């Protein structure tokens, strides 16, 4: 897909994410890998009102080439791409239920959400919790990079999910599945639950390995 069409695709998915309340205000950011670098949503922009012509372009090293200044969280995207060479897109949201799960005490930091559905296992697999860092802290990029070597999706504590995919549609599908599972998890708090057993989850992973 050429760069012009990718800019339109970022705009279309951004508007869909915003209109469905998956991120609000000027939160959340999207990036796509292109042949000579990356396209990213600009800093301070709303995903609901993106202008394709003003989307930021970065070179392979993350330097700003053209368009508006990139999102202040560009380093999260670069950290994912450097570890996941097959990734074609990264989506980071401040989606309500995922953020809420990232604020819970006593979660398993290696796998925050239980395998409530087969589709969660297929699209996310295991979800580690990255410890909290202040916004803009370069150490957050190092932490994300450490996890990204093994996981295509991470949850930033008290912040939100970062998900890589083979392309933008795959990344969006995965982050939406994560948010829906977080919502189910919170709805089930205080109830006895019946998640997939370890054997059932492993069987799903074997049959539908996550490729991101």
Image: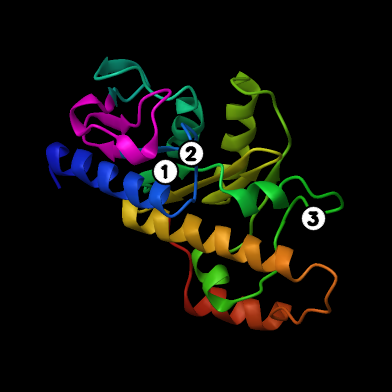
Q: Is residue 78 left or right of residue 37?
A: right
The quadrant holding residue 196 is bottom right
Q: Nearer the viewer, mark 1 or mark 2?
A: 1
Of helix, strand and loop, which one carries label 2?
helix
Number of marks: 3
Q: Which residue is mark 2?
A: 80
Q: Which residue is mark 1?
A: 90
Task: Please name the residue shown 31% across and 36% down the image.
Answer: 49
Q: Which mark is residue 108?
A: 3
Q: Nearer the viewer, mark 2 or mark 3?
A: 3
User: CA separation, marks 1 and 3?
Assistant: 24 Å
Q: Position of residue 157 (x, y in %)?
A: 71, 40
The quadrant holding residue 189 is bottom right
The quadrant holding residue 94 is top right
Which stretch appears magenta? 33-56
Of helix, strand and loop, which one carries label 3?
loop
Q: Is residue 30 left or right of residue 146?
A: left
- In the displayed structure, would residue 118 be above or below residue 165? below
User: CA separation, marks 1 and 2?
Assistant: 8 Å
Q: Earlier in the sequence, mark 1 or mark 3?
A: 1
Whether 37 is among the magenta residues is: yes
Q: Which mark is residue 112?
A: none
User: CA separation, marks 2 and 3?
Assistant: 22 Å
């Amino acid at each position: 897909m050429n760069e012009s069409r990718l800019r339109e695709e970022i705009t279309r998915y951004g508007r869909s994410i915003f209109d469905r309340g998956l991120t609000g205000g000027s939160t959340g950011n999207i990036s796509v890998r292109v042949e000579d670098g990356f396209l990213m949503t600009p800093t301070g922009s709303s995903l609901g009102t993106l202008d394709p012509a003003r989307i930021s372009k970065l070179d392979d090293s993350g330097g700003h080439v053209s368009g508006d200044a990139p999102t202040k969280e560009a380093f999260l995207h670069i950290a994912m791409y450097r570890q996941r060479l097959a990734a074609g897109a990264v989506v980071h949201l401040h989606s309500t239920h995922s953020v809420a799960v990232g604020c819970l005490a006593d979660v398993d930091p290696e796998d925050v959400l239980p395998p409530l559905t087969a589709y969660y296992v297929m699209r996310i697999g295991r979800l580690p919790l990255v410890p909290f860092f202040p916004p803009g802290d370069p150490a957050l990029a190092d932490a994300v990079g450490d996890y990204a070597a093994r996981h295509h999706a991470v949850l930033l504590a008290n912040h939100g999910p970062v998900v890589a995919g083979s392309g933008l549609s795959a990344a969006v599908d995965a982050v939406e599945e994560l948010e829906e599972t977080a919502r189910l998890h919170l709805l089930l708090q205080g109830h006895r639950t019946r998640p997939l057993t370890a054997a059932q989850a492993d069987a799903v992973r074997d049959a539908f390995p996550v490729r991101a």
